[in-house]
Image (cartoon, grey):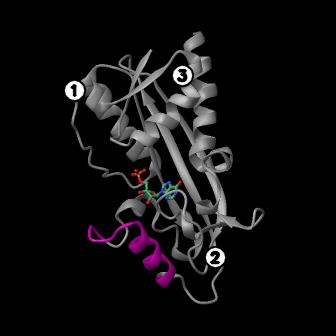
Amino acid sequence: MKMVLASKNQKKMKEMNEILSGMGVEVCLQADVGLDIDVEETGTTFEENSRLKAQAVMEASGLPAIADDSGLCVDALAGAPGVYSARYGGEGLDDAGRYRLLLANMPKGAARTAKFVSVITCCFPSGDVLTARGECPGTIAFAPMGEGGFGYDPVFFLPKLKKTFAQLSAEEKNAISHRGLALAEFQGKLEEYLKK
Ligand code: IMP
């Protein structure tokens, strides 16, 4: 079964194929089916935005479509940047600019607990919808550490491992990350769904 990923991110496609290809599912990019759409993420939850993206791509392609929406929720910032993680601080910032702004915005003396969240939604042309959610708890470091990963990885600290996400290999990160967990749950749900 072919599934269109509602994203232009090759890395996400590779990661999803690694897990789903064993089930006979081939995940391709929008461009592979001649689509070039940017879905506006107008929702206020990861569930809403993930659904908006998958639904739009399913309708445009006529094929099952899969989307993930993810972000970092910081307790001391009332869950911010949350669904706005990719846009935190406005258009002008890059990944390093965004995590530096986050460090600067952390209230002095407050708890530094946080979590990454990922919600995966798959919309089928039949109207069926599958969703899965993964969360990874951690804390916000006082300074960036590590060179790996992307986004907020250098400031997302895992107390048990005493490392940030940016100090883990891709395999180590996938085994515990919000996206890895959501994908594992999604894989189980898809297996059940395909048996029907
Ligand atoms: P999305 O593509 O709309 O889901 O935006 C997700 C944003 O959340 C990214 O641009 C990153 O800023 C952040 N993010 C999500 N997952 C991760 C991760 O695993 N590491 C670091 N940052 C992440």
- The label on residue 155 is none
Left or right, 102 with reference to 62: right
Residue 135, given in percent of the width and then of the height, sits at 62, 51
**Which image quadrant is residue 29 in?**
top left
Q: Residue furthest top?
A: 196
Disc 2 marks a residue whose amino acid type is Arg
Q: Nearer the viewer, residue 164 or 73?
A: 164
Disc 1 marks a residue whose amino acid type is Gly
**Which image quadrant is residue 156 in?**
bottom right
**From the image, which quarter does the N terminus lie in?**
top left
Disc 3 marks a residue whose amino acid type is Ser
Residue 16, given in percent of the width and then of the height, sits at 51, 33
Residue ID at (65%, 56%)? 168
Residue 167, given in percent of the width and then of the height, sits at 63, 62
Considering only order in the chain, which callout, 1 or 2, is on the residue closer to the N terminus? 1
Q: CA distance from mark 2 to mark 3?
A: 38 Å
Mark 1 Cα within 10 Å, few/some/many (few <14, many 20+)?
few
Mark 2 Cα within 10 Å, few/some/many (few <14, many 20+)?
some
